[in-house]
Image (cartoon, rainbow, N blue to C red):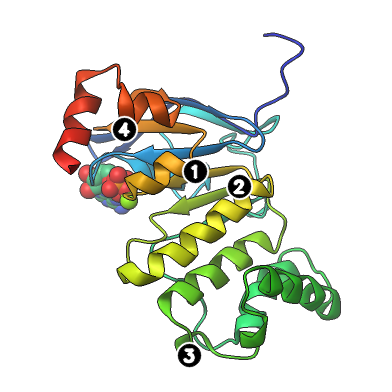
Amino acid sequence: MSAERATPVLRVEGVVKRFGEHPVLRGIDLEVEAHEVVVLIGASGSGKSTLLKTINLLEQIDDGRIFLGDEDITDPRVNADRVRARIGVVFQHYNLFPHMNVLDNVTLAARQVFGIPRPEAERVGLGLLERIGLVEKAKEFPDRLSGGQQQRVAIARALATDPELLLLDEITSALDPQLVGEVLDLVRELKAGGSTIVMATHEMSFARRVADRVVYLKDGRIIESGPPEQIFESPQREETREFLARLR
Ligand code: ADP
Ligand code: MG
């Protein structure tokens, strides 16, 4: 324990998760520092989504511990809603509420979870919509927006409570190819703005450009973790090489 190192935003220690008899996470260790962007890569079924869900307490772990800042969030006495309020999450499928306009979608958590009065929540919400270039859509319903615009709104919504950590799970994989770029550009802006992000993606070129660290998962284990130049140009492990070769 070195005193001069800041507490990481996230520390995952020996996390094991089984579904029935089937181990899906087999002892995951991962630390994420403030302002770091960590990108999870790996074949479908390797455990990326499950790992993100355990961090957000959507899945209970069978062994190990997870710390958000100083707090052991896997302690059974922890209030899960309070933990989730500190983490922004965006999934593959746009999960906007269809019966609410864009601004209400963005401000809902701030109003309901944090009890921020509507005028203030809307001021913040409009600022976020401005930032993602969609302020003119504030009063539209989600079905009037393109998939890319909806994902950007989902990101704005995740930011509305000023989370310590953002979890992004395959946020471009349901999008038409021509809409992927605008969402990835927004992630780049978040990184530039200092957000701390853990994201799973199939977009290797994006992982390469945005990641501070790339983590390759296979069968619920971290096989290799390192800066993108290492992982993509000189992977240290045969399994990483094989995985990347299959993508080309
Ligand atoms: P990835 O996101 O890397 O594609 P997942 O975390 O979704 O991988 O899945 C990892 C493994 O866990 C897969 O074998 C998947 O079938 C299994 N799995 C995921 N969620 C559940 C669940 N709720 N019940 C049973 N098995 C699950
Ligand atoms: Mg997944």
- Image quadrant occupied by the C terminus: top left
Sequence-first tag of 4 and 1: 1
Crowd band around label 1 with a 10 angstrom C-alpha radius: few (<14), some (14–19), many (20+): many
Q: Which image quadrant for residue 27?
A: top left
Q: Decide which of tag 3 and tag 2 comes sooner along the chain.
A: 3
Numbered circle sitting on residue 144: 3
Name the amino acid type tagged 4: Leu
Write the residue at 67% across / 35% down: 34
Three-letter residue code for mark 2: Lys
Residue 246 as seen in the image, left or right of residue 143: left
Tell me how far mark 1 sits from mark 3, CA to CA. Answer: 30 Å
Answer with mark 1 or mark 3, whichever residue precedes in sequence. 3
Disc 4 C-beta below 8 A from ligand 1? yes
Q: Nearer the viewer, mark 2 or mark 4?
A: 2
Other residues around mark 4 within 10 Å, as few (<14) / some (14–19) / many (≥20): many
In the rendered image, is residue 222 in sight? no
N-terminal-most mark, 1 or 2: 2
Q: Amino acid at mark 1?
A: Val
Specify the quadrant that holds the N terminus: top right
Q: CA distance from mark 3 to mark 4?
A: 37 Å
SS of the residue at dot 4? Answer: strand
Q: Tell me: is circle 3 under 8 Å from ligand 2.
A: no
Q: Does the CB distance between marks 2 and 4 fall below 8 Å?
A: no
Q: Nearer the viewer, mark 3 or mark 2?
A: 2
Q: State the CA–CA distance, disc 4 to disc 1.
A: 18 Å
Contact, mark 1 vs mark 2 (Cβ under 8 Å) = yes
Q: Which residue is mark 2?
A: 191
Q: Which mark is residue 32?
A: none
Q: Which residue is mark 4?
A: 217
- Is residue 160 left or right of 227 when viewed as pictured? right
